[in-house]
Amino acid sequence: MLVKGNASGRRNNILQSVKDASSSISMMRLTGAVLVFCCIIDFTFKPKHLHSLRAAVADSTNVLDATKHKNNVSLLDLPLSVKDVAINVGSNIDPIMLADKKYGPCAHNIAVEPIVANKIPFHRQLSVLPAAVSSNPGVMSMRIYNVNGVSSSLAKPAMTDFWNSKESRGDGRLAIVPVITLSSLLNSIPKRINVAFLMTDIQGYDFMAIKEAKNTLKERVTHIMTEVWYDDIYTYSGVHNDLCRDWLPLMTELGYTLVKTANEDDMEKLKARCEKQLKDNPQRPSGKENAGLSEDNAYWVRNDVVEQPFPGVVSVQKYDPGYAEE
């Protein structure tokens, strides 16, 4: 009976192994089908697409094995089906999603949010990184302000105002948060993946974050939206984020063009405004002298693709992928 029982057990093990192998083959076929599907969406036989295919093949081992590339940064284990990524730094509870139909199920989105990451709705095409971004990695104290912490910052407000002084809301309380650099995030994304859009809204730290990542930024990102300040007015103390004095010189040096802001489409008018500001105030005033609120969103495109439009994006709560989800 003992020998017979062992033989029966071995036969059952063999049958189970065959089933497992069949399941593995089916899964490999499915994965391959998804990868091929995502590679042929909007595909035309141009050299850059052939390069993308070669990069995907070369990169796949690194993704699966989580090895390190030349900057000694581990690559994110993103699915091989992912072709394009959008990054939203400082997303609060409603991060952006790539919405153009051409992206479809082959797009992924990364939200970087240190305070309310746990309140962001789940979506299979969205990853949430609970961290702040600055020029150096580490651990810092962040002050929480406004509804859902939407105005929270690593810096102190330059003045007391409605958005940072409501005790019943808990304005001013401290949270200890992990801090990463933007370059480390960009370097962790496999080279086969196109960073289609980068958006920052990090309460005074936008310029600092972009400046730290400048060498990686110009290699990986073509379309960027950043929060900026006007007229040397400080919303937060101890940080520089002025469009005319800080942003335009840096982005011009990196090879980006300012194509519009949320409040201004006439770039000649904006250029004249900057010239007047710098002429009237050759030296930067202090935060105490110029505390206030004068913000806008600036849209930058890398010079080699300046004619290409910004990708369509919507908030995760309004995102309709346009394809069936199980």
Image (tube, rainbow, N blue to C red):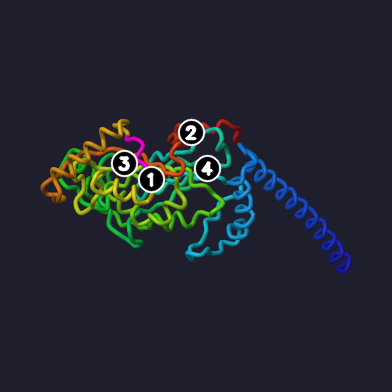
Whole-angstrom CA distance, mark 1 to mark 3, is 33 Å
Q: Which mark is residue 301?
A: none
Dot 3 or dot 2: first in sequence order is 3
Q: Amino acid at mark 4?
A: Gln
The C terminus is located in which quarter?
top right
Q: Which mark is residue 125?
A: 4
Q: Amino acid at mark 2?
A: Tyr
Give coordinates of residue 262: x percent, y percent: 32, 33
* Frontmost residue, 218 versus 130: 218
Mark 1 vs 3: CB contact within 8 A = no
Look at the image and give the residue range highlighted in magenta: 256-261
Give the residue number, with chain letter if any, for mark 3: 148
Q: Which mark is residue 256?
A: 1
Could you tell me which secondary element the residue under label 4 belongs to?
loop
* Residue drawn at point x = 36 percent, y = 51 percent: 114
Q: Amino acid at mark 1?
A: Tyr
